[in-house]
Amino acid sequence: MKIKGFIKLLVFCGILAAAYYYWPWRVIRHPPGVLINVSPRQEDIPPKPLPDVEGWKLTAVAKYGIRARVLGTKRYHSGFGSDVVPVDVAVGWGRMSDQAVLDQFEITMGNRFFFYEWSNQPAIPEGEIMRSAANNHIISANADVKKVIGSLRTGQIVTMMGYLVKARTPDGKGFWNSSLQRDDTGNGACEVFYVEAAKAADTVPMD
């Protein structure tokens, strides 16, 4: 009986360990060092209509591809655009993908923005922070993308391909336009990103 009890305890501990490892919101940490040393790729294009999403009219204005470290995600259940963009994804590349740098920031998300704070002085120049991080309003083009975006964890490496867009509300009275540069801040500085393909990994994928 004692042996059976011990085996049950080992099984229970194994289940707990597996649950922790695969818990969808577990933050992933990495050794110090830059994980992503390439910037997002953008190619401006003539306006191109895309399929409607939740009744919103979408117009592509640039091809866009990014591989970056996930700095955080935020789900929105109500408010402007929550039907077409239920999830925002903040990402970083360059030194904003370095664990040693990120450990010196407090990163939060809310009201369709992401924020970074520090004590005393920033780990890297503020201009570099702005050029190496972005908040993305994700419009999923299909169920596969929606599944990937919905399960992203902080610290993962995400690769996304698609278009930066101008979006118009179903009634035609409201709009939501993507930023087309990486060094802007404040209202209108986020990317409105229509994602056609996405994948995520706990470590940097080997190409």
Image (tube, helix red, strand yellow):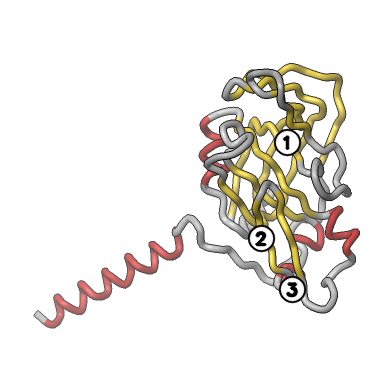
Query: Quarter-wise, where is residue 163 in the image?
Result: top right
| Relative depth, front residue between 97 and 205 | 97
Q: Amino acid at mark 3?
A: Gln
Image depth: mark 3 or mark 2 in front: 2
Residues marked 2 and 1 touching at CB (< 8 Å): no
Q: Residues within 10 Å of mark 3 (few under 14, many from 20)?
A: some
Residue linked to disc 1: 192
The dot on residue 104 is 3
For the N terminus, give its image quadrant. Answer: bottom left
Asked if labels 3 and 1 touch by Cβ distance under 8 angstroms, the answer is: no
Amino acid type at circle 1 is Val
* SS at mark 2 in the image: strand
Q: Residue at x 71, y 35 (%)?
A: 193
Could you say where residue 113 lies in the image, as x and y percent from the top left?
Answer: 71, 50
**Residue 10 location (% of width, % of height):** 27, 74
* Mark 1 → mark 3, Cα distance in angstroms: 28 Å
In the rendered structure, the answer to whether residue 168 lies left or right of residue 182 reads left
Alpha-carbon distance for marks 3 and 2?
13 Å
**Secondary structure under badge 3?**
loop
Q: First in sequence: mark 2 or mark 1?
A: 2
User: Given the image, on which type of amino acid does mark 2 rest?
Assistant: Thr
Residue highlighted by disc 2? 108
Secondary structure category for the residue under label 1: strand
Task: Please name the residue shown 84% across and 50% down the image.
Answer: 185
> Local crowd at mark 2 within 10 Å, few (<14), some, or many (≥20)?
some
Q: Residue at x 71, y 26 (%)?
A: 174
